[in-house]
Amino acid sequence: MTPTAEAGIVGRGNAEGARLFREWFADLGTAAEEGRPSAYVFVMGSLVELLRTFDLPVVFPEINSLQTAVRHVAHEYLDEAEDYGYSPDICGYVKADVATQLRGGRLPMGRIPKPAIAVHTNACNTYIKWAEIWERMYGCPIVTIDTPGSRADGVRPGPGHADFENDRRYVVAQLEELIPVLERISGTAFDIDRLRETLGHANTMARGWRRVLELNAARPSLFNALTDGTIYLGVSNCLRGTAEGARYFEELVEEMELKSAEGIGTLTEELYRLIFVGVPCYPIFRRFGELFTEWGGTFVGSTYLWFASGGANGGFQYDVGRPLDSLAEGLLLGVRDAMDSMFFHTDALLGMFDAFGADGIVYHPIKSCRTVSTGLADSRREIMSRADTPSLFIESDMMDRRVVSEAQLKNRIDAFFEGLASRRVKAAAGAGH
Ligand code: SF4
């Protein structure tokens, strides 16, 4: 590989991801201007593979909301929703979306269309109450696909098991009820061959996503799961089921394999390899990342890339020979994996800690997402009781800058790295003896 070829490939995933995201948003703006019907969905169990076959523009309100924080205007949206009557306590994504709707769909990146339908799972209980807001505002139908999750940590019957097959039949029946509603809303007849096509693209993407995440076990690590990973995650959600999304992930694998072969790391000097648990701090996203990279710390993995991709990290492959059945199976496994990544992740974290040669785990519970944050203190205690794993527990928010203190975060993060450094010195001294 010549340096010129490398120059065209290294960094391509970030640049292309940003371009695809801009184009996807521009298409939503066109749909809004033309008054076309759209479907509102959430990242855990989005069912985009099915919705695309009806030519419905797909809106991800969670992603729109986090963009207001990244662009430093979330507080304006939160204030507006709180003035309207929503509590400071609830999910910040919901409030930013309420304000967006009150503004006629206007966001810093452009405009989103109104929902003609909302389709969601029970992966987060907020999804159900959030969709009811659109039902009240627009009178649109909302469809909840009740997707059974794990009954307990470690209880995960798979395909072929009687419990799983019952769950699959239950989800297939709900999808069969959803299809006529989508036909009515979109005015388009269901075409099972188009579903085969979107499932095929989703398969390519899921294979790539899984491979990209695995490749980051390389030393030095190839991308920062906190920052670069969020760009890849955006593409994995917004372009799932499309040819562009599939190609993007094939090219991303090519980039990561090249970086791995050439030893091209994400940092000039990688000193500490970390795992992130929770949702990033978007109001100061860039600075939040720097608080770690300035110490030579990078994130080799993140539970966020698991649950916020709807469990696509598992690489599930649809059987296009039996599309609807397989879609139900993929939904069941994906949503279950996403929920397990939030609630039952200790085994997966310990496995990743060893396999990726990590130095520490950073827990970042946030005020306005209880779904992800509630069990994190227990998770940390469990990890500490099972292994000698350094960990840091820092709290802020993914949207609300009123509860983000950069100075406090910096104090805790600096102390964590000082601890890691002193562990290293002691270990080296021990090895010397
Ligand atoms: S509560 Fe958490 S998981 Fe649920 S919608 Fe809000 S941010 Fe997402």
Image (cartoon, rainbow, N blue to C red):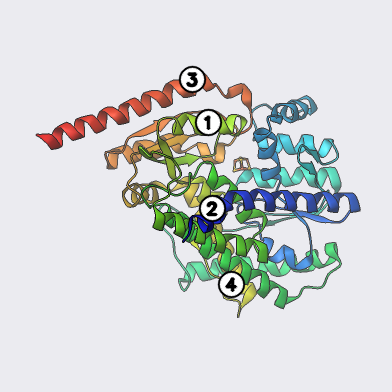
**Disc 3 designates what residue?**
408
Question: Which residue sits at x=79%, y=64%?
Answer: 55
Q: Residue furthest right?
A: 34
**Disc 1 designates what residue?**
288
Please identify, in this view, whether the residue under mark 2 or under mark 1 is nearer the observer. 2
Q: Position of residue 52 (x, y in %)?
A: 73, 64
Question: Which residue sits at x=42%, y=23%?
Answer: 412
Q: CA distance from mark 2 to mark 1?
A: 28 Å
Q: CA distance from mark 3 to mark 4?
A: 48 Å
Left or right placement of residue 185 versus residue 432 in this view: right
**Disc 2 designates what residue?**
7
Left or right placement of residue 141 versus residue 372 in this view: right
First along the sequence among labels 2 and 3: 2
Residue 333 visible from this viewpoint: no
First along the sequence among labels 2 and 1: 2
The image's mark for residue 226 is none
Please identify, in this view, whether the residue under mark 3 or under mark 4 is nearer the observer. 3
Looking at the rendered structure, the secondary structure element under dot 4 is helix
Please identify, in this view, whether the residue under mark 2 or under mark 3 is nearer the observer. 2
Q: Position of residue 299 (x, y in %)?
A: 44, 42
Please identify, in this view, whether the residue under mark 1 or under mark 4 is nearer the observer. 1
| The C terminus lies in quadrant | top left
Question: Which residue sits at x=47%, y=29%?
Answer: 291
Q: Amino acid at mark 3?
A: Gln
Give neighbour class at mark 3: few <14, some 14-19, many 20+ (Cα, 10 Å): few
**Disc 4 designates what residue?**
326
Looking at the rendered structure, the secondary structure element under dot 1 is helix
First along the sequence among labels 1 and 4: 1
Q: CA distance from mark 2 to mark 3?
A: 39 Å
Give neighbour class at mark 2: few <14, some 14-19, many 20+ (Cα, 10 Å): few
- Total label count? 4
